């Protein structure tokens, strides 16, 4: 567990920094743009490359590329075979990205129409969304190359550069908001801010690519751009990527489905959904991405060496860490959603009514938070064995359920129903993946793991009771002065954290080996890599 926790700590710590910067970005965005025409247009323009990034670059490509690269690196050919494979992939990958991006930018009016044809009913909104989307879409190609470079480093257990890159994105976007607000001035056109943000997205891709290229060179790796050649290994990678695109990305594909339905709802609905998802993404990104990134190369090594016991142990440890962190996070977010939305987002152009609706969306989204994270632990069990087809069928079933539920609930419950449908579909995907892994003998629940999770649930119940009592006591302060907001949220977080970990310790929900290892790390700090 030591190496897993160390890797998760590195990735999770840097991802937390990124999520905090992203949180600051969205707080500024809410106050500067509110939930109106320009905000909706930018959210759609940012959703397109960002969702494709998660789906292809950080999803399908990473889960297919990292195990193949790791096998080449640790096989008979060693560094030479790994370097050749990386060069061959880069040569083909670069041209695929260029062609795909060019086609998408040309076809952007059609793409936006498919996702948001209702924008045509608002004068200027559809045209603005198309214009901004063409500016932001090159970010996909840039960040896809970043994902490949991160994969080279992740295979060598150098997780820090890839995890740190998103921080640069949020810093550049924050600068874009401030510059756009200054250019707009008081009472100016919000489209100026949206344009500045769209330009910042593309600029951030350039900055991230430069940083990862420097990190790869610093690690002693060299990549060469050659004429594309479809070698057997590159063809094999392509065959793995195609099904993995769907199997690894149910959450991202659901984002497109949600976007389609959200754009048919009253103006501002898409913006409120994306801002609410920021609260959901904070623990999801820190825990889910960290665990998923760390477990894949480790699991691939155990499976390649035919060590089934270690593979089972690794997945069990990851499962336990995931529930230990996500169960209390989901409960706390659900109970305290009104406080968080009022304290963080209400102000400027973002009204109290916007905040109240956003709180309901948060509650619906976090119902699926544990499932969102656990899926990232279960999927590597297939990908490490180069089985990218099975997750396709589970993802397809979940997506069909998601669409079916949306057709029923969106008309009746609006944007809140849409968020709830996403949570339900993710939970179904999680359950299907586990059932298949269990039947194939690749991973199974043990009595020890089940008992630990039941103890975690007991600790969560104690925390939830305290937060439920404490929440109304400080209602006047959530939308008060900055100091009042900080102190009231600080009291909620401190009370929830203290009660949960105290209860978890008393009922035995904390793994003694994990506590001992963390104690050793505090006593003797481990030097961190740059």
Image (spheres, rainbow, N blue to C red):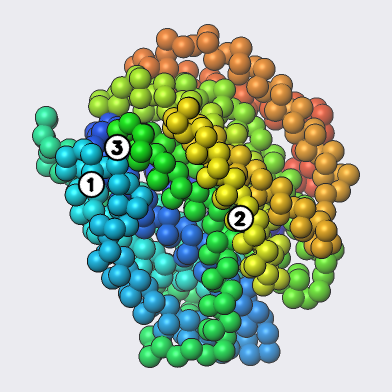
Q: Position of residue 179 (x, y in %)?
A: 18, 44
The quarter of the rendered structure image containing the N terminus is bottom right
* Mark positioned earlier in the residue sequence (1 or 2): 1
Observer able to see residue 203 = no
Residue at (68, 89) in percent of width and height? 76
Residue at (57, 89) in percent of width and height? 232
Q: Secondary structure at mark 1?
A: helix
Q: Quadrant of residue 249?
A: bottom right
Residue at (77, 27) in percent of width and height? 458
Observer able to see residue 147 = yes
Between the residue at mark 2 and the residue at mark 3, the CA separation in whole angstroms equals 33 Å
Please tell me how crowded label 1 is: few (under 14), some (14-19), or many (20+) other residues with Cα within 10 Å: many
On residue 423, the disc is none
Between the residue at mark 3 and the residue at mark 1, the CA separation in whole angstroms equals 20 Å
Q: Which residue is mark 2?
A: 395
Q: Which residue is mark 1?
A: 126
Q: Secondary structure at mark 2?
A: helix
Q: Secondary structure at mark 3?
A: helix
Q: Which residue is mark 3?
A: 29
* Mark positioned earlier in the residue sequence (3 or 1): 3
Q: Position of residue 225 (x, y in %)?
A: 38, 85
């Amino acid at each position: 567990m030591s190496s897993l926790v160390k890797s998760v700590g590195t990735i999770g710590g840097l991802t937390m920094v990124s999520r905090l910067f992203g949180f600051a970005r969205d707080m500024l965005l809410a106050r500067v743009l509110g939930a109106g025409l320009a905000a909706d247009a930018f959210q759609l323009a940012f959703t397109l490359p960002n969702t494709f990034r998660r789906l292809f670059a950080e999803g399908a490509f990473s889960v297919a590329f990292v195990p193949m690269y790791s096998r080449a690196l640790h096989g008979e050919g060693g560094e030479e075979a790994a370097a050749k494979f990386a060069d061959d992939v880069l040569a083909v990958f670069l041209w695929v990205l260029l062609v795909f991006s060019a086609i998408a930018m040309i076809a952007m009016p059609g793409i936006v129409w498919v996702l948001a044809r209702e924008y045509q009913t608002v004068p200027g909104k559809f045209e603005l969304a198309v214009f901004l989307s063409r500016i932001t879409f090159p970010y996909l190609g840039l960040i896809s190359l970043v994902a490949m470079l991160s994969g080279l480093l992740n295979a060598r257990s150098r997780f820090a550069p890839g995890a740190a890159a998103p921080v640069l994105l949020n810093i550049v976007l924050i600068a874009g908001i401030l510059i756009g607000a200054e250019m707009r001035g008081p009472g100016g056109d919000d489209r100026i801010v949206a344009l500045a943000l769209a330009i910042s997205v593309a600029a951030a891709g350039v900055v991230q690519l430069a940083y990862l290229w420097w990190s790869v060179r610093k690690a002693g790796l060299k990549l060469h751009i050659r004429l594309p050649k479809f070698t057997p290994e590159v063809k094999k990678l392509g065959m793995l990527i195609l099904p993995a695109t769907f199997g690894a990305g149910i959450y991202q594909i659901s984002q497109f489905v949600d976007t389609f339905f959200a754009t048919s709802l009253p103006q501002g609905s898409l913006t409120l959904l994306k801002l609410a998802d920021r609260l959901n993404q904070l623990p999801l990104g820190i825990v889910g991405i960290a665990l998923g990134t760390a477990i894949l190369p480790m699991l691939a090594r155990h499976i390649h060496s035919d060590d089934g016991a270690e593979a089972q142990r690794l997945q069990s440890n990851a499962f336990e860490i995931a529930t230990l962190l996500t169960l209390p996070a989901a409960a706390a977010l659900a109970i305290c959603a009104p406080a968080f939305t009022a304290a963080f987002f209400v102000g400027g152009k973002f009204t109290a009514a916007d905040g109240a609706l956003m709180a309901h969306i948060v509650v619906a989204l976090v119902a699926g938070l544990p499932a969102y994270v656990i899926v990232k632990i279960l999927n590597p069990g297939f990908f490490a064995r180069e089985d990218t087809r099975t997750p396709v069928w589970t993802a397809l079933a979940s997506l069909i359920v998601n669409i079916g539920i949306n057709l029923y609930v969106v008309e009746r419950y609006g944007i809140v129903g849409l968020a709830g449908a996403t949570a339900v579909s993710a939970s179904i995907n999680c359950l299907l993946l586990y059932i298949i892994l269990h039947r194939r003998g690749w991973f199974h629940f043990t009595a020890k793991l089940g008992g630990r999770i039941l103890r975690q649930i007991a600790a969560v119940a104690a925390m939830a009771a305290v937060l439920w009592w404490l929440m109304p006591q400080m209602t006047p302060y959530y939308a008060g002065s900055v100091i009042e907001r900080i102190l009231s949220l600080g009291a909620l977080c401190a009370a929830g954290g203290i009660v949960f970990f105290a209860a978890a310790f008393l009922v035995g929900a904390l793994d003694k080996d994990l506590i001992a290892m963390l104690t050793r790390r505090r006593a003797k700090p481990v030097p961190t890599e740059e």
